[in-house]
Amino acid sequence: MKLKFKNLLILYFGILIVSCNSNDTKIIPFTPKLVYSTDNFSDTIFVSDYINSIIFHDNNYYFLDLRSATIICTDENFEFKSIIGRRGQGPGEFPFLQTFGVFDDKVYLGGTGTILNVFDTDGKFLSAISYDSGVGQIIVSSRMVIKENKITGCFNGEYSTENFPIVTLDFSGNIIDVSEGTVNDVTKTISSRSVHELEHGGFLSVINSFPVIDVYDNNMNYMHSVDISYIDVIKKHLNQIKSRPEDPYTVLSNIIADSYCVKNKLYLLCYSAVGNIYNSENSCK
């Protein structure tokens, strides 16, 4: 499994944390340095060409493999530890795995349906959390934020169409809160979003199909949004999308391939706009 890094940008959100009313950001483009590669995995670990997201937690890496509908756990040196979940229709299984989160030595998996499956880090199925079908039967964020008694993610249900795409559940599946987003067009609210928790409090929501980052307080109340359309690689991509208005998929063309927040720094992996933006050469593999 190889990743093609086209453009990786880093956004500093320190000012946003200090002053919730400030929209200032600092942009630093940089070239990533290869430290580890999944090419070095042993032959006993099967990793497909469709890794959707990665979480680093408690010195372990967790890889979401969409093709096998499993989570692959390794240590920090990519030595295999466990496989969590599997494809299927039975207890603890999903026909399609979409998202996951790690908290308190447990791994929470979400896919199609209205169930979150809970495993220990060794891959033992522990329990299933059922939630209301109105929340949505597909979770459209590649990671969930899990802390204390709360599970936060982006769902495609009735709240999303009413411009409340982010839903927080408790560990029993009850809805604790719903959070609004800045984009109110129905086709845009179902765009996948990545929700990130800031180290010193608050949350960020990255809308993968649109150049907007929403900022929330500790209780997931919307504060303000940050326009990132001026970033060069994003600006070029947007211009290319505008040049193809006849394409029915233009409205949901992803601009952000993935995002990750570490120590109040938001890393964005952006799709480049070179040639055909729908060509596989311009996406993660």
Image (cartoon, grey):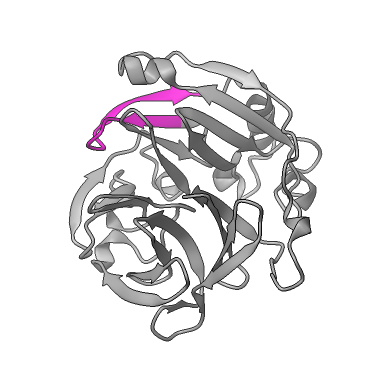
Magenta stretch encompasses residue 252: no
What secondary structure predominates along the stretch shown in magenta? Answer: strand
Quarter of the view holding residue 105: bottom left
Quarter of the view holding residue 112: bottom left
> Measured from the top left, where is residue 274 in percent x and y?
79, 36
Drawn side of residue 117 relative to residue 52, left or right? left
> Measured from the top left, where is residue 59 in percent x and y?
52, 49
Drawn side of residue 259 relative to residue 16, left or right? right
Residue at (23% x, 61% y) in the render: 171
> Measured from the top left, where is residue 243 in percent x and y?
69, 34
Q: Is residue 23 above or below residue 181?
A: above
Residue at (59% x, 44% y) in the render: 254
Magenta stretch encompasses residue 217: yes
276, 50: nearer the viewer:
50
Kindly tell me whether residue 262 is visible in this rendering. yes
Residue at (32% x, 47% y) in the render: 166
Quarter of the view holding residue 62: bottom right
Q: Is residue 40 above or below residue 127?
A: above
153, 267: nearer the viewer:
267
**Quarter that holds the N terminus:** bottom right
Q: Is residue 124 above or below residue 192?
A: below
**Magenta span:** 213-227
Drawn side of residue 198 relative to residue 240, left or right? left
240, 201: nearer the viewer:
201
Q: Is residue 114 above or below residue 61?
A: below
**Quarter that holds the C terminus:** bottom right
Residue at (60% x, 73% y) in the render: 68
> Measured from the top left, where is residue 250 in percent x and y?
61, 45
Kindly tell me whether residue 70 is visible in this rendering. no
